[in-house]
Amino acid sequence: MSSVFEQIGGAAAVDAAVDIFYRKVLSDPLISHFFDSVDMDRQIGKQKAFLTMGFGGPNNYTGKDMRNAHKHMKLTEAHFGAVAGHLQSTLQELNVPANLIGEVMKIAASTHDDVLNV
Amino acid sequence: MAVLTFEGQRFAPAAGESVLDCLLRNGQPIQHSCKAGLCQSCLVQAVDAEVPPKAQAGLKGTLQASKHAMACQWCADADITVKLPGAAAAAVDSLVCELTLLNAAVMKLVLKPADAASLDCKPGQYMNLTNPAGIVRSYSVANDVQRDGTLEFHVARTKQGMFTRWLFESAAVGDAIPLRGPAGSCFYLPDAGQNEPLLLSAVGTGLAPLFGILNDALAQGHRGPVTLVHGSGQPELLYYRAELQQLAQQHVNFCYVPVVLENPTSDVSCRSGDAASLTMAALDPARIAETRVFLCGNPDFVRGLRKQAFMKGVRSANIFCDAFVQRPVAAV
């Protein structure tokens, strides 16, 4: 059985998803300010790393990294839900099969406590 | 035994170790994040090394062509010399060979480098210039050094600029100007496709790199539609209008759009309004996903327009920017 990352299309899927996903978060007034940095190329890189992790691909993030990266941002359930929602609708837009979207959303949900520092 | 050379220091990589891990193990301050070849935080630039394709996978074509690589994906199993992107290499000697005012506030500075043939500088990249007082500034290259044997820069007079005061008040033909560079990933790459639309937009001396990129694209036979929007406060601060109008007459696929904020002379040959809006209006919605956008000028203009273009549907990998910052660029 190949990994979720492979089934979803690997790095090519990340490339296809990143612009769509990033446009969605930048359009969302609840969370856009977290993502609207002056260096867009760097932000795109970060989003690719996030999507790769979400797709179950190779990454070196630990729960501690996640916690440290987010702990000063005063994030709430609403912020977490907004990002998860944009991830889900990005995958729907790309016609990813529902069972794979479910797998990705499970991985995203697993970061909940670290991201919200609870 | 392979040697990894970085910023003048030599390190011995362990078997199978990446360039990034070797540098980190030796206490070198390299930014990094995912270590999986995705976030592109750990970019380095090859000085004397063949970059393996894996270390460039997913990088913009212009970054690949200028030998950028992700240190985390580069196995240090051969002799490799790398530097931080944009970090100064050895200086090249050059002499001032022309100083011409392009308008009341912009000087055209032409330098003749000692060994132009060996200077691998693409029109649109930038170089660091050191004036006789030791002041270093970076300016974008407006021409093809391989074709002309010289480097052309456009320098705007600034009120308190030490470099510009020297340039406008006491620089002379024959002055020696050491050069370092090039750097920057804002240039034309024919391999990225020659049939797609190119949209170039600049304010002020942001025209310099775009004038270089425009001529490069046309000289290399770009076939897709090319639009250049050049914005300025007043008509008399636009420059190279005759040259650009002539290019538009010579190339049916090139459209020149001069724009001014205020147009008291009712000069009918240029549009009134703000350059950003007219740039967005020039994007062809039917071909937006394949359009390459080049933006140069002050940071607010570049960042604002970059976001607008992206949100409208231009791919992030197809936006090339050069924001002018008033500082010595050595410390990026």
Image (cartoon, coloured by chain):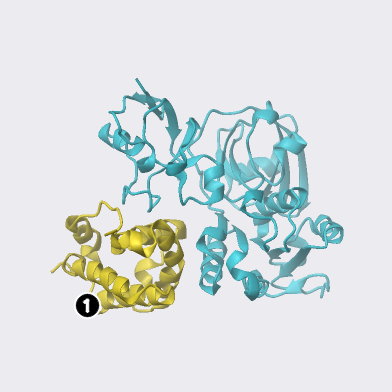
| Res A42 visible | yes
Instruction: Residue at 24% x, 66% y: name it.
Output: A107
Q: Is residue B3 above or below residue B180?
A: above
Q: Which residue appears farthest toward the left when viewing the image?
A: A118
Residue B115, picture quadrant = top right
Instruction: Give the x, y percent position of residue B158.
Output: 62, 52
Residue at disc 1, secondary structure:
helix
Q: Amino acid at mark 1?
A: Glu
| Residue B327 shown left or right of residue B208 in the figure | left
| Res B189 visible | no
Instruction: Residue at 38% x, 58% y: name it.
Output: A10
Instruction: Give the x, y percent position of residue B165.
Output: 64, 44
In this view, the residue in front, B257 or B290, is B290
Q: Which residue appears farthest toward the front when viewing the image?
A: A1
| Residue A10 shown left or right of residue B109 in the figure | left
Chain B colour in the picture: cyan
Q: Is residue B274 above or below residue B30?
A: below
Instruction: Residue at 31% x, 73% y: name it.
Output: A101
| Residue B139 shown left or right of residue B88 in the figure | right
Task: Chain letter for mark 1, please.
Answer: A
Disc 1 designates what residue? A77
Instruction: Give the x, y percent position of residue B306.
Output: 54, 65
Disc 1 crowd rating (10 Å Cα; few below 14, some 14-19, many 20+) is: few
Chain A colour in the picture: yellow
Instruction: Give the x, y percent position of residue B322.
Output: 57, 54
Quadrant assignment for the N terminus of chain A:
bottom left
Q: Is residue A115 above or below residue A57?
A: below
Q: Which residue appears farthest toward the top when viewing the image?
A: B1
In this view, the residue in front, A28 or B151, is A28
Quadrant assignment for the C terminus of chain A:
bottom left
| Residue B180 shown left or right of residue A93 in the figure | right
